[in-house]
Amino acid sequence: MSFDNVRTVKSLPKELFSLSIPTGMALVPGATYATKAASDVAATSALTFTVVRPKFLPEGFSLAHESVGTHDAVQTLQLVYDDGLRDFSLFENATGRLPKFDNGAPHAIAVGDQDGYYSEAGNETIVSWNAGGLNLTLVGDLPAKELSAIGASLKP
């Protein structure tokens, strides 16, 4: 699903964001793969590759936080961007290999001048491609064409 004509508002009612745990239910923390960095310097200082950041972000999006972690022996940077309602993550690592697409065969998509692949799982879209020796993967609740436009602005 995508929206081409969206109107922003100055404020939303606080009740919209007051979430509580229903009676009889318990909140259980999920898996943690990386620790949120105190600053962009702290996140990127231990990396063995040069970080690339998007030059284009959809209107309203900004960097929320970043973290570095190791999963399956691969050092990975995660940059999280949001606009207050939607979000997406950019994962970068120096493997130059695509992630596993667990929900079926991925579809081809152009990401700028690069050949990439995308897949949709529920409300999440995954777009992944290799460039400059890096694997770049965008995951979020944005349509593939919007993630591809963000990806096209990444120049390793």
Image: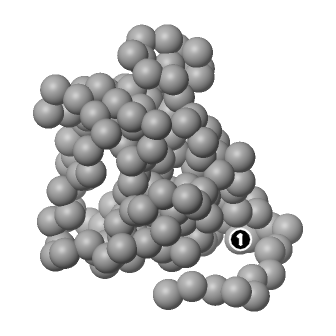
Q: Which residue is mark 1?
A: 13
Q: Could you tell whether 110 is left or right of 108 in the image?
A: right
Q: Residue at x 18, y 56 (%)?
A: 100
- Residue 67 visible in the shown view: yes
Residue found at the far front of this picture: 113
In the rendered view, would you say 112 is above or below 38? below
Q: Quadrant of residue 116?
A: bottom left
* Numbered-mark total: 1
Label 1 residue SS: loop
Query: Is 99 left or right of 142, judged from the image as shown?
Result: left
Q: Is residue 106 above or below residue 132?
A: below
Give the vertical position of 49 relative to 79 (above or below): above
**Which x, y percent locates residue 44?**
50, 19
Along the line of sight, which residue is nearer the eye, 29 or 66?
66
| 56 or 89, nearer to the observer | 56
Residue type for callout 1? Pro
Q: Quadrant of residue 9?
A: bottom right
One can see residue 84 in this view:
no
Q: Residue at x 41, y 17 (%)?
A: 47
